[in-house]
Image (cartoon, grey):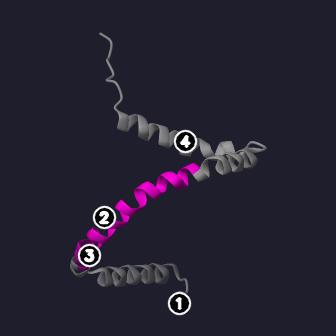
């Protein structure tokens, strides 16, 4: 009996497309003349993108202003609970001991 694979959802298609695009972009930039083609497309589409971005700009700014105080309070609470300074000191001591075992100088 053949295995049936379900159809991909929009999110899966988007993630696979973004992954493929980011994986092959360096290879595209190796091709001779790629920089000129990218520059030409940028000059063509940048004004349209800038017009469309202004539509989203003010709602996003209002959302950020509304959300930032509670996020800042939460970050402060979490920082007090994590004991990051003690963890950094323990890591530093461990690194120093490793250098001492290997007979290397450290500063």
Q: Is residue 92 above or below residue 70?
A: below
Q: Quarter of the image for the N terminus: give it.
A: top left
Alpha-carbon distance for marks 1 and 4? Answer: 44 Å
Rendering coords of residue 44 (x, y %): 66, 47
Neighbor class of circle 3 (other Cα within 10 Å; few <14, some 14-19, many 20+) is few
Alpha-carbon distance for marks 4 and 2? Answer: 30 Å
The mark that comes first in sequence, 3 or 2, is: 2
Q: Nearer the viewer, mark 4 or mark 3?
A: 3
The mark that comes first in sequence, 2 or 1, is: 2
In the rendered structure, which segment of residues is drawn in magenta? Answer: 48-76
Q: Is residue 36 above or below residue 74?
A: above
**Residue picked out by circle 4:** 21
Instruction: Answer whether residue 96 is magenta in the image.
Output: no
In the displayed orientation, state which residue is furthest to the bottom: 107
- Regarding mark 3 in the picture, which secondary structure is present there? helix
Q: Nearer the viewer, mark 4 or mark 2?
A: 2
> Magenta residues: mostly which secondary structure?
helix
Rendering coords of residue 37 (x, y %): 72, 44
| Residue occupying the point 52% across, 39% down | 20
Rendering coords of residue 27 (x, y %): 66, 43
Alpha-carbon distance for marks 3 and 1? Answer: 40 Å
**Residue picked out by circle 2:** 63
For this rendering, which residue is in front, 68 or 30?
A: 68
Q: Is residue 46 above or below residue 87?
A: above
**Residue picked out by circle 1:** 107
For this rendering, which residue is in front, 30 or 68?
A: 68
The mark that comes first in sequence, 1 or 4, is: 4
């Amino acid at each position: 009996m053949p295995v049936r694979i379900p159809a991909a959802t929009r999110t899966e298609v988007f993630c696979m497309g973004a992954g493929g695009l980011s994986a092959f972009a360096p290879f595209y930039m190796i091709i001779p003349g790629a920089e000129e083609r990218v520059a030409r497309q940028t000059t063509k589409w940048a004004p349209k993108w800038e017009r469309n971005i202004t539509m989203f700009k003010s709602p996003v700014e209002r959302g950020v202003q509304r959300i930032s105080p509670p996020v800042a309070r939460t970050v402060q609470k979490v920082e007090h609970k994590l004991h990051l300074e003690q963890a950094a000191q323990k890591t530093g001591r461990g690194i120093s001991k490793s250098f001492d075992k290997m007979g290397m100088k450290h500063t």
